[in-house]
Amino acid sequence: MTKKKKKKSKKGISNHTNTILGILKKDRNKTFNYKQIAAILGVNDASSRNQIIKKLHQLKAKQEIEEVDRGKFKVVVNTEYHTGILDLASKGNGYIICDDFEEDVFIASNNINKALNGDEVEFYAYKRKHRGKQEGEITNIIKRAKTEYVGTIQIHEKKNFAFVVPDSNKMYKDIFVPINKINKAEDGDKVLVSLEDWPERADSPNGKVIQVLGKPGEHGTEINAIMAEYGLPLEFPHEVEAYANNIDLEIKPEEIAKRRDMRKDLTFTIDPKDAKDFDDALSFTVLDNGLYEIGIHIADVSHYLQPGTVLDDEAYERATSIYLVDRVVPMLPEILSNGACSLRPHEEKYTFSAVFQMNEKCEIKNEWFGRTVTYSDARFAYEEAQAIIENNPEMPSKAAISDIDTTIPTEVSLTGKQYKTSNDIAFAVLKMNELARKMRGARMRDGAISFDKVEVKFNLDEEANPVGVFFKTSKDANKLIEEFMLLANRKVSEFVGKQKKTFVYRVHDEPDESKLAQLQTVVARFGHKLNFKDKGSISSSLNNLLKDVVGKKEQNLVDTLTIRTMSKAEYTTHNIGHYGLSFDYYSHFTSPIRRYPDVMAHRLLQRYLDGEKSANEEVYEERCKHSSNMEYLATKAERDSIKYMQIRFMQDHQDEEFVGVISGVTDWGIYVEIISNKCEGMVSVRDMKDDHYQFDQDQYAMVGKNSGVVYQLGDEVIVKVKNTDLTKKHLDFYMVGKPETE
């Protein structure tokens, strides 16, 4: 915790030359007299005022400031200023990301000048460099990235104040809170605090507690703290819930008349077994000309979500649903997300569809986009659809449809066409899987990259305690859905893009060459080689790498590092294509229940189907930026919740030894990922008592000075839990050693 907040001095000021110059630099376009500067500094005695006047004239003589009017001074601007985003390191130094410089600009901790992580700042660059990097000093804070922080409150009742110690290691100051602004918090509570101001001479910012989250370490407290840290909502405002509950959800004949009626087409959903919101459904029909008509039907959220309403405003602000380990925080109220908009079995629903006619070679012979009404005949879990695929290794002909193994019982409504039977639905699954495989193969040949990273999932008991870990992998049933969703997303964006009209694209730039070089260095240690000759060779060698590591100890490490070499996908109106998918046009159209960009895509597509002019690009670009930012925050919250649950899981395994793989090496320690459960923790070099270990940056290794023992990236090691910190989300290990080799 920081020291007690210093009281304002009544006599004299320290370091007055730099302080006065700093005040004038902070607002370069404004003039100041000595009284204004004295007020900012919090001094009111004659001696201090005289010092200020004296220093003002000294700075004027040095031509660092100018006297614009009698007694009114302004800084002389003789330096080129830049703007950028501050990225703080945990040790207090930082780097500014700025388009004016090829590399990030180093900012020493004494030149941060009260800027915080993520702030948009103004700075000037020195002529000198720091370890080869451009160095600078922050001169002004343009915009705070955030003003609310989660932390633990420490109350000093006798001294009538408190400090909040932030959870984030990138928040380098504790936050001073007067006793009358602690909002009934008790000492040791985890709270959400809002920054109010940061006086010129104060060591810490001032704030007030706006929410008491609970006792540290308790499950509800920690999950709420994760959401609060990123400014994400847990509940819907009352007026939003009330509005949603009053929407007319009835399927009306007059609305059906405006749509393509596809209720008689064989239609089904395939989703996770615990899913409650079904964004998408597939329909399948064999046409008389031998073509397959396949419909990708998406919940018509935009029918219920009308612009200018409190419901739409709330959905836009959230921009995405958030999937934490123990819950979903939806973008839409439950009456819509799990009810009216969810394509549940045996219910008629309004949908927005992309319908394609294709042949056996997956060549698109006809396409249609528009609003529809559909009826889902069956609901499959991925496991059920996968069982049908695995039980029928050879695709049967239409004549042999009665021979299909439909081991998985499927409830099917018989109110539509007579062919709606379990066998017909199974045939549809098998044929669409066959087509999906062909489409996936074509994508890979075109240069798409196959990311099938293993996902860590937890088995939770009724109190949300982790009782087991399992890994989610993508099988044929998952890939079937993926391919047809990709088809709809690609073709919708292509349809609009070729008209040169404003649209919401999902873009993905080419990977950074320096990151690819770093990846090559790492994977070479496992015997893998990459080819960076051209775009095609990069894609094929990355795919070969990802294929080669499957089932090996380094798989998760290599998967993670490969993903990190990729640029970050984002939403924008400026189409540059999608590198990872190897598509010239790509959008998000298929998940409007959980993503606001999909809602925007629906609205824009309908606008253009109606023959209207192009929408305002600036307006939609701003919405794209907001959506990308909210997606980023949601992803961070989801990762934090996984990390939190991993640490909770490891709390019950503190006496066990685990085999892990070294996933990172730094000068302060070794990061190890346990093979059996993917939990990652750190072995501090200070805890490695058997030798004096030194970091070898070139080898990505920690080397024993006396023994010569080497702990290198990718090595298998045995570790034991040292400490589990739920508050800081830190998992610390002891190094036991290396496994014995036969």
Image (cartoon, grey):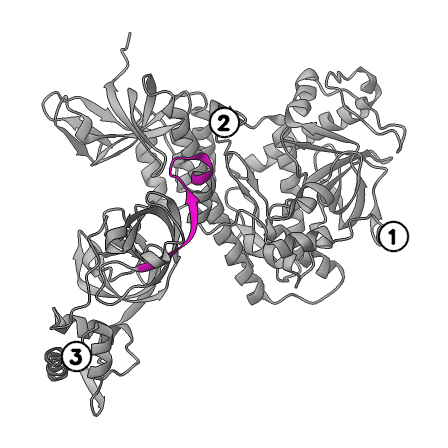
SS category of the residue bearing label 3 = loop
Mark 1 or 2, closer to the camera: 2
Label 2 environment density (alpha carbons within 10 Å; few <14, some 14–19, many ≥20): many
Q: Is 632 displayed left or right of 188 in the figure?
A: right
Residue 257, numbered label? 1
In front of the other: 690 or 584: 690
> Can residue 370 be seen in the rendering of this structure?
yes
Whether the magenta-drawn stretch holds residue 212 is answered as yes
Please state the horizontal and vertical placement of residue 330, each as a whole percent of the image.
59, 45
Disc nearer the start of the sequence (1/2): 1
Residue, disc 3: 64
The amino acid pointed to by label 3 is Glu
Q: Are marks 1 and 2 in contact (CB under 8 Å)?
A: no
Residue nearest the viewer, comparing 5 with 34: 5
| Residues at circles 2 and 3 in contact by the CB criterion of under 8 Å | no
State the separation of the CA atoms marked 2 and 3: 62 Å
Q: Which residue is mark 2?
A: 458
Q: Which residues are magenta?
A: 206-221
Tell me the CA gap for discs 1 and 2.
Answer: 46 Å
- Mark 2 or mark 3: whose residue is earlier in sequence: 3
Query: Is residue 93 found left or right of 380 in the rendered image?
Result: left
Q: Residues within 10 Å of mark 1 (few under 14, many from 20)?
A: few
Q: Is residue 87 magenta?
A: no
